[in-house]
Amino acid sequence: MTMKLSSSHMDNIPSTPGKFKMEKSPYIYRFRHYSSLAKLTFWSFVFLGLIVVFFFKTPSTSPPNSMPSDLSRRSLKTSSWGGPAWEKRVRSSARIRSQNGLSVLVTGAAGFVGTHVSAALKRRGDGVLGLDNFNNYYDPTLKRARQALLERSGIYIVEGDINDIALLKKLFEVIPFTHVMHLAAQAGVRYAMENPNSYVHSNIAGLVNVLEVCKNANPQPAIVWASSSSVYGLNSKVPFSEKDRTDQPASLYAATKKAGEEIAHTYNHIYGLSLTGLRFFTVYGPWGRPDMAYFFFTRDILKGKSIPIFEASNHGTVARDFTYIDDIVKGCLGALDTAEKSTGSGGKKKGPAQLRVFNLGNTSPVPVSDLVSILEKLLKVKAKRMVMKLPRNGDVQFTHANISFAQREFGYKPTTDLQTGLKKFVRWYVSYYGSGKKSSH
Ligand SMILES: NC(=O)c1ccc[n+]([C@@H]2O[C@H](COP(=O)([O-])OP(=O)(O)OC[C@H]3O[C@@H](n4cnc5c(N)ncnc54)[C@H](O)[C@@H]3O)[C@@H](O)[C@H]2O)c1
Ligand SMILES: *[C@@H]1O[C@H](CO)[C@@H](O)[C@H](O)[C@H]1NC(C)=O
C-alpha cells in the first residue's frame, strides 16, 4: 500500500557492519631503490603471504556474488559474547518468576513487535531473553531506545545475528528455552527491490538456522513465529481465511514468508518441532516502525510535507486491516500458551507434533484516506495529499482478516479500533520526537 520510503530511508542499508577496506601501503614503492636481492626477498614474502592468505581463507559454500559482502559470515558477529559475566546476564534475564512460567527466546526483540511481546512476557513472570542484530534498515537509535526500555524491566537483548549458529547453540546451552518467539526478519515490501538478499538472509537462511538449532536442542522448544498477511498476495477472496490460497505472492517479502511456512512444515514433519505461524495484518502503535505509512504520514504531516495516497488502478480504495499492537501481543501470548510441546529431541522425531497457522488481524479494513483523516484530526494539521496510482511492486490493494480460527483456539479478540490506537500512537510519537511545530513563544 502506502509504504513508499522517502529517499532518506533508502540511504539506509541494513546489516552492514564493518566493511573491509584495503589500503595501499607506501612501503611497496620504497623497495624500488634497493638491490635485486631485496627485491627477491620482498617478492618471496608477497608469495608466502599469498599462500598463507589462501590457506586461512575459510572455504565458502555459497556461489560468488550470491550474497553481498556485507552479509558475509565475518559480519555476523556484531559484538562479542560469551564469558561468565555475559552468561550471568543471560541467565538473569531468562529467569522465570512465576509458577509454570515460560522461558522464551525472543528474536527481533529490539524490533517493534518484539519489544512489546518481550515486555508483556516479562510482566507476567516469564523468563525472556532477546536477540537482535540492530541492523539499520530503519533508524537503529529507535531500536536502541526500545532496548533501553526493556533493560529497565530486566530484559537483556543479546546483540547478534540469527545466522550465527555458534551463538544460537550457546544460548541453548545456557538456557533450556521452552519457547522461541521468532520475530527477527527483514520486513517491508518495497525495500525487497533494493536489497533482495537481505530478505533471503534473514527470512529464509536465518529461519532455517533458528529451526536447526531448535531441532537439535534437548528439550526442543515450541516455536511461534511471524509470517505475514502478505502471503495472501493476489488472492481476492475476502475476508482472508487460513485455508485460502497463498501461492501468488506479490512481493519477494511475501514469497520469503510463504517459503517460511513451507519450511516450518518440513521441520514439523521431519523433526517433530511444534510450530505456529502468525500472519500479522498491518500492525501499528507506539514504538512502531518508521517505514510504515501511519508512521511516516505522521512525521510528514507534522513537517508540512506532502504524503502519497495510493489508489488502485480501477480507482478503488486501498485499504488495510490495521491491527493495534496490544491486540497482536495478546495473539502472540495466546499462541505461545496454547503451543504444545515439540515431540522430538536431539534432532530425532518421536511422534507427530503441532503445526498451526493463524491470522492475527482486526477484521475491519480501513481505507488509507481515512487513516489520513484520523491523523489530521489528532495532529490538528491539514495533510498535503498527493493521490497516486498504486504501483505494482508488492503492495496489494486490500487486506481483511478472518480471525475465527485464532478466536476459537485461544480466544483472540481485537479490541482497539484505528481511531483509539492512532491516538495512542500519536501521543507516543509526540512525546518521543516532539511535535515538530514551531513553539508560539
Ligand atoms: N509490523 C507489521 O505490520 C508486520 C506485518 C506482518 C508481519 N510482520 C512480521 O513480524 C515480525 C516483526 O516485525 P516488526 O514490525 O517488529 O519489524 P522490526 O523490523 O521492527 O523488527 C524486526 C527486528 O529483527 C531484527 N533482525 C532482522 N534481521 C535479523 C537477523 N538476521 N538477525 C537478528 N536480528 C534481526 C531487526 O534488527 C529488528 O529489530 C517480522 O517477522 C515481520 O516480518 C510484521
Ligand atoms: C472464516 O474462517 C472459518 C474457518 O476458520 C470458516 O469456517 C468461515 O467460513 C470463514 N468466514 C468467512 C466469512 O469467510
Image (spheres, helix red, strand yellow):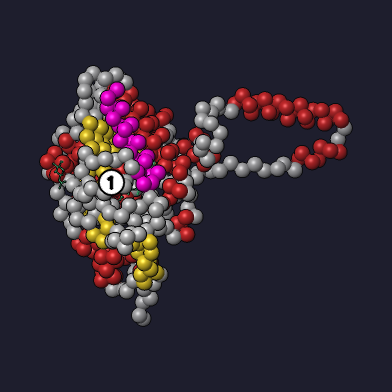
- Magenta part, dominant SS: helix
Q: In which quadrant will I find the N terminus? A: bottom left
Q: Which residue is mark 1?
A: 235
Ligand 2 within 8 Å of disc 1? The answer is no
Report if residue 264 lies within the magenta region: yes
> Going 82% across and 28% down the picture, which residue do you hit?
40
Q: In this rendered view, identify the residue nearer to me: 94 or 182.
A: 182
> Going 38% across and 68% down the picture, which residue do you hit?
386
Q: Position of residue 101 (x, y in %)?
A: 18, 36
**Can residue 70 be seen from the camera position used here?**
yes
Report if residue 118 lies within the magenta region: no
Q: State whether residue 49 is above or below residue 89.
A: above
Q: In this rendered view, identify the residue nearer to me: 385 or 27.
A: 385
Stretch of the chain drawn in magenta:
249-270
Q: Amino acid at mark 1?
A: Asn
Q: State whether residue 217 is above or below residue 131.
A: above
Q: State whether residue 211 is above or below residue 258.
A: above
> Going 69% across and 28% down the picture, which residue do you hit?
49
Q: State whether residue 301 is above or below residue 172.
A: below
**Can residue 302 be seen from the camera position used here?**
no
Q: In which quadrant will I find the C terminus? A: bottom left
Q: Position of residue 147 (x, y in %)?
A: 35, 48
* 360 with respect to 212 (left or right): left
> Going 28% across and 73% down the picture, which residue do you hit?
380
Q: In this rendered view, identify the residue nearer to me: 252 or 407.
A: 252
**Callout 1 crowding tier (Cα within 10 Å): few <14, some 14–19, many ≥20:** some
> Which residue is the extreme one toward the bottom?
441
Quadrant in which ligand 1 is drawn:
top left
